[in-house]
Amino acid sequence: MDWTGWAVFGLVATGALTALLSLSQLAGWTRMDLPLLLGTIFAADTDRARAIGFVIHLANGQVFALVYAAAFAARGHAGLAFGASLGALHALVSLAILVPALPAVHPRMASARAGPATGAVLEPPGPLALNYGRRTALVTLAAHIAYGAVLGVLLNPR
């Protein structure tokens, strides 16, 4: 396993993914703010929540980079196409399962059944996170494909 590559390039890939998501938000293509979504699980103050969420996002990026590195090692090769395909799978699982499940565990997120009257401050993401904008799913898919491609190119599978 490429431990040094995992440690360094996991951060590089997570940085690329985060930059793409942030730039997409600034461009108005999505309203999804992943550090805010993650951080408000632990803090009500949005500035503090963003900082906490950013650290969680970086840690998650490292965990997923480890999974990608293990997949590359198991296959005996990495590469742009394989990394990008893992990134697409990662995005689809996130959008179809993980993000829509957030209202069930997030203390500050409304759900489709119990709206903001419950004291929630965040809108539920909805299917494929489309409540955060029509382009959110495409932006998320593109960012995760880039994440996987970066890891596929930079990680040594052995």
Image (cartoon, grey):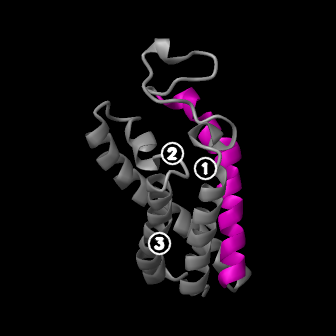
The residue beneath circle 2 is 32
Cα distance between the residues tagged 3 and 1: 23 Å
Question: Secondary structure of the magenta portion, mostly?
Answer: helix
| Tags 2 and 1 touching, CB below 8 Å | yes
Left or right: where does residue 61 sit relative to residue 91?
A: left
Task: Please identify, in this view, whether the residue under mark 3 or under mark 1 is nearer the observer.
Answer: 1
Residue 43, position as x, y percentages in the image: 32, 34
Kind of residue at badge 1: Thr
Residue 10, position as x, y percentages in the image: 47, 72
CA neighbours of label 1 inside 10 A, class few (<14), some (14 to 19), many (20+): many
Which residue is located at x 48 percent, y 76 percent?
6
Left or right: where does residue 130 sit relative to residue 6?
A: right
Left or right: where does residue 141 sit relative to residue 44?
A: right
Query: In this picture, is 93 found above or below 127?
Result: below
Q: Which mark is residue 10?
A: 3
Q: In the image, is residue 117 part of the stretch drawn in magenta? A: no
- Please state, as top left, top right, bottom left or bottom right, where the N terminus lies in the image: bottom right
Query: In this picture, is 149 found above or below 113?
Result: below
Cα distance between the residues tagged 3 and 2: 22 Å
Q: Secondary structure at mark 2?
A: loop
Q: Disc 2 or 1, which lies upstream in sequence?
A: 2
Query: In this picture, is 142 found above or below 127?
Result: below
The residue beneath circle 1 is 136
Toward the top, the furthest residue is 117
Residue 27, position as x, y percentages in the image: 48, 56
Q: Secondary structure at mark 3?
A: helix
Look at the image and give the residue range highlighted in magenta.
79-106
- For the question of whether residue 78 can be seen, the reply is no
Cα distance between the residues tagged 2 and 1: 7 Å
Left or right: where does residue 49 sit relative to residue 35?
A: left
